[in-house]
Image (spheres, rainbow, N blue to C red):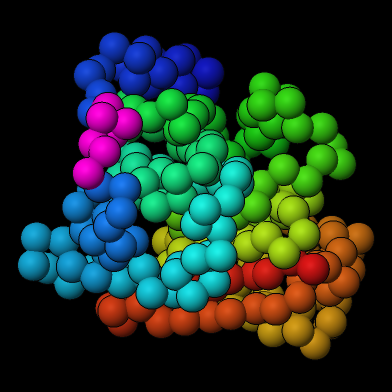
Amino acid sequence: MNFLSLLKRKFYYLLSPKINIDKQKNLSNYSLEYLFSFYKTDKASFINNKKSHGYAKHYLKYLNKFKNKKINILEIGSFSGASAAAFSKFFKKAKIFCVDVNIKNFKYYSKNIKVYGIDVSKKVHVIKFLKKININKNKKFFDIIIDDGSHKLKDMLFGLQIFFDHLKTNGFYIIEDYKFPNYFSHLNDSSELTIDQLSKNILTKKLFKSKILEKKFQIKMFNEIKKIYRHKGNLKISDIIFFKKK
C-alpha cells in the first residue's frame, strides 16, 4: 500500500459522516454479546439472524476482569469500527487504538477511539504509528491486542513480532480466525509455521526456522507467554487464540 493511497483513504475518512456513539448512553450496561450484535460485528453469534463467529463468550472468559479498569486496547484491522464501538461501550474506561489499511470504511466516532490508517505489514508504518502515540521501543502500553486484520499468515506473524513487546504483564494478545491460512490457501502466503503450529512450539519451547520470528523473539515468547487458550467459534472456520503474557 503506497503513501498516496493511504492519504486518499484518510481524506475520505476525515470527510465522511460518523455515528457518535458517545451519545448512545443507553447501551453502556448491555452484554458484550448484545453489543457485538447491535453494532453488527462478525464477533457476534448472530447478525440479522444469520450465524456468525460467536466470540463474545471467549472474550468474556478472559477479559471481563478489565471491564471497569483504565486500559489500552490495540485493534489491528477495524474495518467499519463495529467491534471497536462495541468494546468502547463494554470497557467503559478503555482507550482503543484502531489501525487499518483502509479507514475510509470507519463509520463510528468516540472520544475513546483513535483511528490510524497504516499498513501493518510495513515496519516503517508501524514504527511511525508507535512514535505518534508516544510508545518507545521498550514501553509496555497495551493491555489487550486484537489481530483481526488481513488473516494472512505473514501479517499475523509480523504483527506478533512487532507488537508483542508492547503488551503489558497479564495482558492478552488475541488473534481472531487464526486458522484461516489452514482453510484458505491464498492466506497461507509463506513457508512459516502456522499459528496453531507456532502455539505448540511455544508450549514445548521448541526453536524453529523462521524469516520473520527471530530466534531472540522466539525465546522471549517461550519465557513470557504464560498461557495459551484456543477456542472454536460458531462456524467451521471460526477459531480464536489468546496468548496471556506473564
Residue 216 drawn at (x, y percent): 91, 60
Residue 10 percent across, percent down from the top left: 41, 18
Position of residue 235 relative to residue 177, above or below, is: below
Quadrant of the rendered image containing residue 77: top left
**Is residue 25 shown in magenta?**
yes
Instruction: Give me the residue at 35% from left, 78% from top.
Output: 233
Residue 99 to residue 185: above or below: above
Q: Looking at the rendering, which quadrant does residue 183 occupy?
A: bottom left
Residue that sits furthest to the bottom in the current view: 204
* Residue 181 pos. (x, y %): 47, 68
Q: Is residue 100 left or right of residue 12?
A: right
Magenta range:
20-26
Task: Please state which of residues 58 and 80 is positioned toward the viewer in this rendering.
Answer: 58
Q: Using the image as rendered, state which of residue 9 and residue 109 is in the foreground.
A: 109
Instruction: Name the residue: 24% across, 36% down.
Output: 24
Residue 200 falls in which quadrant of the image? bottom right
Q: In the rendered image of this protein, does residue 185 appear above or below residue 110?
A: below
Horizontally, residue 115 falls left or right of residue 30, namely right
Q: Residue at x 87, y 71 (%)?
A: 223
